[in-house]
Image (cartoon, helix red, strand yellow):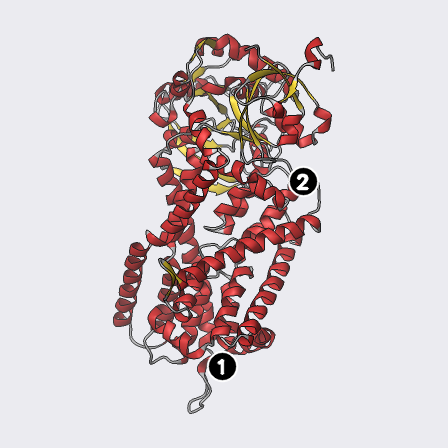
Amino acid sequence: MNQAPLVALVGNPNAGKSALFNALTGARQKVGNYPGVTVERHAGRLALDDGRPVELVDLPGAYSLDPSSPDEQVTRDVVTGSQAGERLPDALVVVVDAANLDNHLRFTLQLVSLGLPVIVALNMIDLARRDGLELDPAILSQELGVPVIPTVAVRRRGLDELKKALTATLQAGPVVRPGGGVVEDIVTLQRRARVISEKATISETAVRRWTHRLDAVALHPVFGSLLLLGLLFLMFQAVFAWSEAPIGWIETGVAAIGDLATSALPPGFVRSLIVDGLIAGVGAVIVFLPQILILFLFILLLEASGYMVRAAFLMDRLMATAGLSGRAFIPLLSSFACAVPGIMATRTIDDEKDRLTTILIAPLMTCSARLPVYSIMIGAFIPARQVLPGVGLQGLVLFSLYVAGIVGAFVAAIVLRRTVTKGESSGFMMEMPKYQWPRLNDVLLGLWQRALIFLKRAGTIIAFTTIVLWALLSFPKPPAGSDASPVDYSVAGRIGHQIEKVVAPIGFNRDIALALLPAMSAREVAVAAIGTVYSIDNPDEDSGENRLVDKLRSRWTLPTALAFLMWFVFAPQCISTIAITRRETNGWKWPAFMVGYLFALAYIAAGATYWIAIAIGL
Amino acid sequence: MNAPATVSVPLCLSEMPRRKSGRVAGVDWDTLALPEARRLRELGLDEGVTVELLHQATFGRGPLACRIGRMTVALRRHVAGAIHVMPDAA
């Protein structure tokens, strides 16, 4: 099927490129990666008027062919045919914002000069009109020497015309590439772009734009900051409040499947593996899908509406005191859902030292995988009493854990910027897109893709780790008649015994030592791992979370539980984060450094918590 | 740089009154870091382009939101300070 012509969508950021891509391909998209880089490759299929299929790829937004980020590098390499894993496109669809021709035409001119067949989608023409701008596509087409099709991607307008033009362009035959090459001189191109834009503009009436009215509030030094705080509060509130019901459904569902498997299978080896290992382990993780999706929903909405850049703008001053820029706010906010997409989002940061620092502190943001660990520990050890009217002690402890992570990240950034990532303070320069209503379909599609990635992870890595842990905990079995605990006698028990020697000084017991290793695959596995340890240790008892809370209470002291919580604030217990850091920094040096400094911090913080708790008599 | 006669009058973009537009008379490209200068050019900043100071993030030293051509762009103060603007006649 590789013979279908390849068409690439290219354009400036904020040209509505992804909306056009979604409108053209619908949900038939494949999200992959370009080899060697973590830039996502979005591809989809599109049927032309003559019935021929076309493969459409959505390239990362770029300002020019002179790349300043890995994303822009991929765009440059694809359109010049030098990207590994991608053939030279048979045609380009250049998406331009009709209301921002001066700027977007410059990149268009550069792309046209490559010699590939080009069609220009004059997108968001309705918004341009609303802003009082009347354009003539025919003049634009004449000046550029390529077809120009007015489109409104979000309203699916102009799509048929675009397909028709694409059909004609592709029928015109294979690409003949003149040796023109890339025109590099930005200033010359920019001036030509302005001349063309002026010619194509029929009339322009000044209209007070909506975006400016909204910005008067959103960027206001006082109201803007309050609005941002309010939105963040709402977001974290929603993560907990809205997820309660769906979490209940998933728990009920997992329990039902577990019961079904228990009654369907004969007692013994296989049943223990499937019920205690697989279903309990994967179930313990899938429970967090609602919270992750709610967090991503907010992040997608903030991004699609254009607000995210405003948040970065408001945060720049604060971030600058830690030697970072407002741009780092976006990846760090995403890291509250998961550090992996957060670290991937650092690709938009131009400055290398700035980007590296952001990557190194991203794991300190409290990701959703820590929630299961936090909530079970808090549920078991922190009494549910009111400290102030409306403020419970449990909630307060959870909040402090979030704050501990943020403060830790801030201090780490200051130290890193003065030592290993020392350098000029980086700049902050960002285009602020117009506000727009997020489109439901685009948001749902984004959520669906996130859910799929999460479920795949739960179904593969986490299931695998849980089964391996179960096996290591189950064998070898103590000889009949021995009173040794089955866990202590097993392979895992012996490994755990060695780890215990290292972590005993910070108050950790055997159960924690056993849980730490599997929790490297993902933090939430710690809960499942402790559960597995107990269910193998005492196979007669019921399993289940409520029972786990009771078991924890009877076996752990409060200082140990608090130390365990502090450990999870800092410890880099996540293989995926380490792997993504290796890929994003092209080597083992930085992930090794990250793991080292975070483990050191975790050890110190947990130890200090334990000994202080003992000293004050908790 | 072939400076036109008006160069002595212009204000820095960071010192312009808010919501008062003007045209770029010149830019001290040398005072900007290389990637900064390049990004600024990519955002369409050039002599003759219409610019306007729109918003300030925080009191004091925060970044500025400026209009460059048809775009709104967030800049730090030292960058806006390198852009010399000839205010439009009222």
Q: Going by the image, does A539 lie left or right of A609?
A: left
Which of the 4 quarters of the picture holds residue A288? bottom left
Instruction: Relative to A497, say whether A145 is above or below.
Output: above
Residue drawn at the location 44% of the way across and 14% of the way down: A206
* Residue that badge 1 annotates: A488
Residue drawn at the location 25% of the way across and 71% of the way down: A263
Residue A373: % across, % down: 44, 64
* Residue that badge 2 annotates: A425
Image mark 2: chain? A
Asked which secondary structure carries label 1, the reply is helix
Which of the 4 quarters of the picture holds residue B29? top right
Residue drawn at the location 53% of the way across and 43% of the way down: A329
Residue drawn at the location 30% of the way across and 67% of the way down: A258
Residue type beneath disc 1: Asp
Number of numbered discs present? 2
Image mark 1: chain? A
Q: Going by the image, does A331 lie left or right of A395?
A: right
Asked which secondary structure carries label 2, the reply is loop
Residue A135: % across, % down: 44, 12
Neighbour class for label 1 at 10 Å: few (<14), some, many (≥20)? many
What is the CA distance from the residue labelled 1 to the residue labelled 2? 53 Å
Which of the 4 quarters of the picture holds residue A98? top left
Figure quadrant of the N terminus of chain A: top left
Residue A257: % across, % down: 28, 64
Is A475 in front, or is A510?
A: A510
Residue A71: % across, % down: 56, 36
